[in-house]
Image: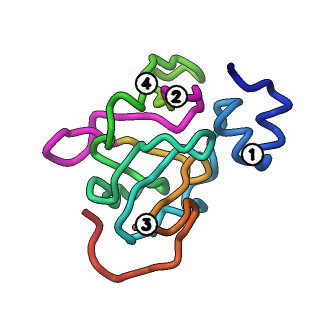
């Protein structure tokens, strides 16, 4: 059964609610996962669905965490978004319907895609650590 707005407001902090449920966008260069270089899996902050792997994360220079492909295409839904007089493709969590960001056709090989995600719509799971962990700031290059 889908959650009500009140249930989402109890589960999510105000920024997460704005992005995931109201299709908002966090300010560029402010997200907690922009510079995360730890290996692991990015999941939906709304429902925990696995969305992206650190193996496909790259530094796009846009101010948001970017990935060249999703970890599990069954967990991601793409939808045309013509808001704000722009034609874009919105990325949604297929499991809970949460707005994650947008995908563009200006990413690196092998896909040429740039999944431009809001950090607050994501949680991070490294090994056996719980989601939301962001303890490591290793100096290796983004993959």
Q: Secondary structure at mark 1?
A: loop
Tell me which label, 1 or 3, sits earlier in the chain. Answer: 1
* Nearer to the camera, 52 or 115: 52
Residue ID at (74%, 45%): 12
Q: CA distance from mark 3 to mark 2?
A: 21 Å
Q: Quadrant of residue 10?
A: top right
Q: CA distance from mark 1 to mark 2?
A: 16 Å
* Nearer to the camera, 66 or 130: 130
User: Which numbered tag is attached to residue 77?
Assistant: 4
| Labels 2, 4: front one | 2
Which quadrant is home to the C terminus?
bottom left
Q: Residues within 10 Å of mark 2 (few under 14, many from 20)?
A: some
With respect to residue 49, does 130 lie above or below? below
| Labels 4, 3: front one | 3
Image position, residue 105 (x, y; %): 28, 34
Q: CA distance from mark 4 to mark 3?
A: 24 Å
Q: CA distance from mark 1 to mark 4?
A: 21 Å
Image position, residue 120 (x, y; %): 62, 51
Can you identify the residue that label 3 sits on? 126
Q: Secondary structure at mark 2?
A: loop
Q: Secondary structure at mark 3?
A: loop
User: Which numbered tag is attached to residue 12?
Assistant: 1
Residues under numbered marks 1 and 4 in contact, where contact means CB atoms less than 8 Å apart: no
> Would you say the magenta stretch is mainly helix, strand or loop?
loop
Q: Residue furthest bottom?
A: 139
Tell me which label, 1 or 2, sits earlier in the chain. Answer: 1
Can you identify the residue that label 2 sits on? 95
Direction from residue 7 to residue 23 in the image, left or right: left
Which quadrant is home to the N terminus?
top right
With respect to residue 86, does 40 lie above or below? below
In reply to whether residue 105 is colored magenta, the answer given is yes
């Amino acid at each position: 059964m889908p959650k009500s707005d009140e249930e989402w407001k109890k589960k999510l902090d105000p920024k997460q609610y704005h992005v995931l449920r109201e299709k908002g966008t966090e300010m560029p260069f402010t997200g907690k996962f922009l510079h995360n270089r730890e290996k692991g899996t990015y999941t939906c902050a709304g429902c925990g669905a696995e969305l992206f792997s650190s193996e496909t994360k790259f530094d796009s220079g846009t101010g948001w965490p970017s990935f060249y492909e999703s970890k599990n295409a069954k967990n991601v839904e793409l939808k045309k978004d013509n808001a704000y007089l722009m034609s874009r493709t919105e990325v949604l969590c297929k499991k809970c319907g949460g707005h994650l960001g947008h995908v563009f056709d200006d990413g690196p090989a092998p896909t040429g895609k740039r999944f431009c995600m809001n950090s607050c719509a994501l949680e991070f799971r490294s090994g056996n650590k719980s989601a939301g962990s962001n303890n490591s700031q290793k100096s290796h290059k983004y993959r």
